[in-house]
């Protein structure tokens, strides 16, 4: 008795046609995102930031679930760090002007969250190559990133220790501009 196999979508189509459809779909998505940014910037910003948060969480999930099968802990180190980058990015997204979640915040705090997240990310990518040759103990890494993230969030929300990144009426601060380079 022969088994019938079900064709997968796109199977049997010429490869150039499949590639062209993918490029056209990506171009259409970019055009739609551009149009959305022109008509409702808050929705556009929230959508793009939440997509970045989902990617950060996905990096963590993939790295955590593949840790037993990889020969080094580079990916695991990056994955755990991106979990915390995503958490800070959630704060940035919810604190963004117009969202209404943190009405006491000015435009400074969401910008500070963004810079904090980028500093965590940059530090992680700078030291991650060390874990190509070393073993990682996940619990201490979670502890260190938890403390750094909590202190960073507290330094913005309660302690006012994090340098200002945006001054209403003046714009971006030198710290913010230099931090982007």
Image: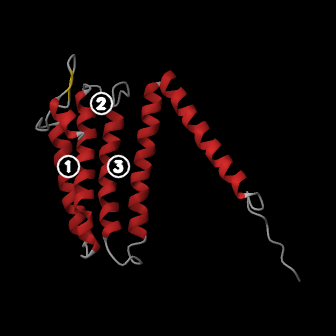
- Is the residue 9 above or below the residue 156 in the image? below
User: Residue most toward the bottom?
Assistant: 1
Q: Which residue is identified by label 3? A: 86
Residue found at x 29% / y 45%: 88
Q: Earlier in the sequence, mark 2 or mark 3?
A: 3
Q: Quadrant of residue 14?
A: bottom right
Please, which colouring scheme is shown?
secondary structure
Residue found at x 23% / y 65%: 141
Question: Do tag 2 and tag 1 residues touch (Cβ < 8 Å)?
Answer: no
- For the residues labelled 2 and 3, the Cα–Cα distance comes to 18 Å
- Asked if residue 86 lies left or right of residue 120, the reply is right
Front tag of 3 and 1:
3
User: Mark 3 falls on what kind of element?
Assistant: helix
Residue 37 location in percent, x, y?
48, 27
Find residue 161 and name its label.
none
Residue found at x 47% / y 30%: 43
Q: Which residue is identified by label 2? A: 102
Residue 181 location in percent, x, y?
23, 41
Residue 50 location in percent, x, y?
43, 42
Front tag of 2 and 3:
3
User: Residue most toward the right?
Assistant: 1
- Is the residue 174 above or below the residue 86 in the image? above
**Other residues around mark 2 within 10 Å, as few (<14) / some (14–19) / many (≥20):** some
- Is the residue 21 above or below the residue 14 in the image? above
- Asked if residue 173 lies left or right of residue 67, the reply is left
Find residue 150 and name its label.
1
Residue 59 location in percent, x, y?
40, 59
The one of 101 and 32 positioned closer to us in this rendering:
32
User: Mark 1 falls on what kind of element?
Assistant: helix
- Total numbered labels: 3
- For the residues labelled 2 and 1, the Cα–Cα distance comes to 18 Å
């Amino acid at each position: 008795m022969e088994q019938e196999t079900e064709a997968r979508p796109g199977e049997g189509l010429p490869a150039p046609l499949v590639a062209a459809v993918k490029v056209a779909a990506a171009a259409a998505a970019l055009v739609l995102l551009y149009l959305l940014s022109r008509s409702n910037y808050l929705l556009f910003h929230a959508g793009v930031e939440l997509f970045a948060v989902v990617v950060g969480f996905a990096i963590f999930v993939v790295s955590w679930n593949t840790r037993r099968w990889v020969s080094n802990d580079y990916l695991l180190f990056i994955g755990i760090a991106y979990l915390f980058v995503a958490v800070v990015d959630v704060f940035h997204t919810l604190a963004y002007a117009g969202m209404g979640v943190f009405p006491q915040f000015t435009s400074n705090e969401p910008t500070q969250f963004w810079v904090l997240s980028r500093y965590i990310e940059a530090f992680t990518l700078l030291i991650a190559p060390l874990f190509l040759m070393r073993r990682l103990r996940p619990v201490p890494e979670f502890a260190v990133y938890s403390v750094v993230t909590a202190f960073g969030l507290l330094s913005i929300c309660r302690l006012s220790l994090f340098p200002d990144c945006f001054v209403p009426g003046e714009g971006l601060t030198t710290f913010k501009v230099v931090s982007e380079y």
